[in-house]
Image (cartoon, rainbow, N blue to C red):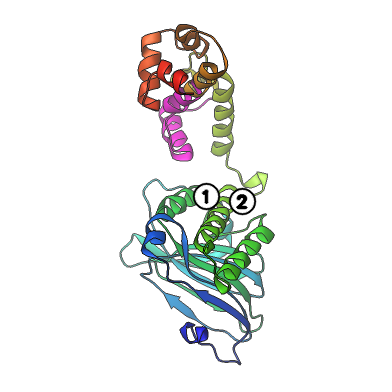
Amino acid sequence: MRDSFFEKYKTSEVTNTRRVINTPSAFTREHFFYIQEAGYLKSLKPHLSRRSGLQSYLFLIVLSGSGEVTYRETAKPNASTGSDFGRRNSTTATGDDGNSSLVTAHAKAGDCFFLDCRNEYTHISSEDDPWELMWIHFYGPQCDAYYDYFLKQQTWHFHTAHLAELTAAIQSVIRFHEEPTDDTDLLTAQQIVNILTLICTETDRSGAEISALESKLKQILHYLDEHYTETISLDFLAEEFYISKYYLAREFKKEYGTTIIRYVLAKKITHAKELLRYSNSSIEEIARLCGMDDASYFNKVFKKMEGCTASEYRKQW
């Protein structure tokens, strides 16, 4: 009975097809990551899939063989280009509106794709080297935020060092839905978070592909981590690292999602919280140890960031 819900393939086109489709509860839709479909197939002949306008995200792995994936990219202001892996293995055609472009990526074993399915996409196996795929369609309240974060690090067509872990996660999701229990929704959400974490934090870029700007920003970040208790100005950083202060301010926020000032303040407050919990130092002394000589300013910043005063934090913890 379950097979009647699945997209039909002719027996001459695929083998070893394995799919699950899910209809989550209203509670799950509102609070968790959930799958809409997950599956595996090995193609015998080319089979074209074309979709658009789906409120879904697709993570696709090419296990073997080759083919093509075409995706309509939407231009985002100030978006990072991420790794150029996909650019080196793709062709582009600009859309009529000028704000989007159809990009065709040539896929082979080990390639991964992460797509926002509200945009148009197609994929088709090559005729002489049919592919083997594993995929998961999913959605949830935090999907858009994860995808935006992902695109700052990477492109939608990429390689990863965690291929075995990612395939295992999708296999687990398929198994959970083939043999559902009361815990299936929670276990599925856990695996989707695992997948998102792996692909958002791990890339397959070589050192040569890391830009000079990215390398300099990492040096500056390391400096801030080491010297956050000192007085650090944008002018000082610009002079120390030979970079325009306006360019630095813009690129730092683009890369790390926060301003330099907020980053340093967060480091100071984190250090203050450690001292409040694990030392008997006074509030005034802790402020000085964090590089903030004005205790009233320290208290003002602490309350703004934590929602309570330093004294209240110490008492709570």
For the residues labelled 2 and 1, say whether their Cβ atoms are less than 8 Å apart: yes
Q: How many marks?
A: 2
**Residue 137 at x, y percent in the picture:** 48, 67
Q: The disc labelled 1 sits on which kind of residue?
A: Gly
- Whether residue 156 is situated above or below residue 5 in the rendered picture: above
Q: Residues within 10 Å of mark 1 (few under 14, many from 20)?
A: some
The residue lying at 51 percent from left, 58 percent from top is: 186
The residue lying at 45 percent from left, 36 percent from top is: 251
The disc at residue 203 is: 2
- Whether residue 264 is situated above or below residue 58 in the rendered picture: above
Q: Is label 1 in a helix, a strand or a loop?
A: loop
Q: CA distance from mark 2 to mark 1?
A: 10 Å
The residue lying at 52 percent from left, 56 percent from top is: 155
The answer to which quarter of the image holds residue 303 is top left
**Residue 85 at x, y percent in the picture:** 59, 57
Magenta segment main secondary structure: helix
Q: Nearer the viewer's eye, disc 2 or disc 1? A: 2
Asked whether, in this view, residue 207 is left or right of residue 156, the answer is: right
Res. 81 visible in picture: no
Q: Is residue 262 magenta?
A: yes
Which residue is nearer to you in this view: 49 or 102?
49
User: Which residues lie in the magenta part?
Assistant: 241-268
